[in-house]
Image: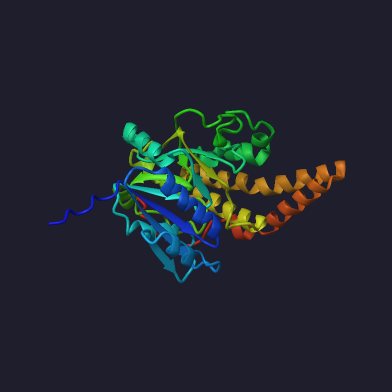
Amino acid sequence: MTSQPSPPTVSIVVVSFNTREMTLDCLRSVYAETRTPFELIVVDNASSDGSAEAIAAEFPEAKLLAEGDNHGFAKANNIAARHATGEYLLLLNPDTVVLDGAIDKLLAFARRRPEARIWGGRTLFGDRALNPGSCFARMTLWNVFCRSSGLSRLFSGSALFNAEDFGAWRRDSERQVDIVCGCFFLIPTAFWHELGGFDLQFVMYGEESDLCLRAAQRGARPAVTPDSVIVHYGGASDTVRVDKMVRLLSAKALLIKRHFPAWQRGLGLWLFRLWPLNRWLLLAFAARLTGKPGHREAAAHWRRIWNRRNEWQGGWPGPGTGGLPA
């Protein structure tokens, strides 16, 4: 009688779209640096660069879901999670590289801090400089004011004026946070299903923020550790700057509508809309003052974003589709 293989401890989900070489490097690093029993689930969002074929050839043991449509990040992860059999679910971006047993260390952190219920690590850029986007604080009325007024940029190292980005904190200590970035995001699989996964109203960006804030309503206290380190290059499949910013602003506007106290939403959205306008006007003034091409290009960038405000100022449209609490 043959024994059945033990179930994996963690189901690692990677969603790819036209990032073949980066995705292959990511998957190689997972296998090279992970000793904890795992299963790998890869969703390819209808890539045209041969990603699915290359992944199937090099990693036949992975569960490859080669989709005929580009579902985006949120829906693709929801699809993958239905196939997960591990105790934990780890979302991992394809433009990442796992360093020095990072997944094993993150799982050890999760077992040591079970009350967090969502865990993340430390991210670096390709040159190994700190990528601070591994976690951040929730948006508040104060944070929106500081960003829209330029205080968060002027005093970027301040924990008071740049509270959403945690000021000058180097992500070099364990800390409870509000949001763990979806690029390296660990959660118990059962808790993911309890939350209903990502809310599909967030077409792109903001999905993990919404999920973490809903999780906090159920007692979760997300946390990060500096011991678990990956490289996150960032933006590998989203390179059009204005389009990317329009999508990001749409997500942030929806987060304000969804998660701000009712009495703060109107003022919060009003202040939020001033952010691109103020950036455009200040950069245009700097361009006239200095004549620097960089200022002119940046001003034009923000002017185009402001001119498309009807696309983002109301947030992503449509009803929520995730497991929102009643």
Residue furthest to the bottom in view is: 68
Report the side of 92 relative to 166 (left or right). left
Is residue 150 shown left or right of residue 253?
right
For the point 33% across and 42% down, the residue is 218
**Nearest to the observer: residue 152 or residue 45:** 45
Residue at image point 36% right, 39% down: 107
Q: Is residue 184 above or below residue 311?
A: above
Q: Is residue 236 visible?
A: yes
Which residue reaches farthest left?
Answer: 1
Q: Where is residue 104, by image quadrant?
A: top left
Camera-nearest residue between 307 and 107: 107
Residue 163 figure quarter: top right
Q: Position of residue 263 (x, y in %)?
A: 49, 43
Taking the image as shown, residue 282 lies to the left or right of residue 230, namely right
> How far from the left and from the top, in percent, is residue 311?
61, 60
**Nearer to me, 142 or 59:** 59
Provide residue 61's location: percent of width, then percent of height: 36, 59
- Figure quadrant of the N terminus: bottom left
Instruction: Reply above or below: 169 against 30.
Output: above
Residue located at (47% from left, 67% from top):
53
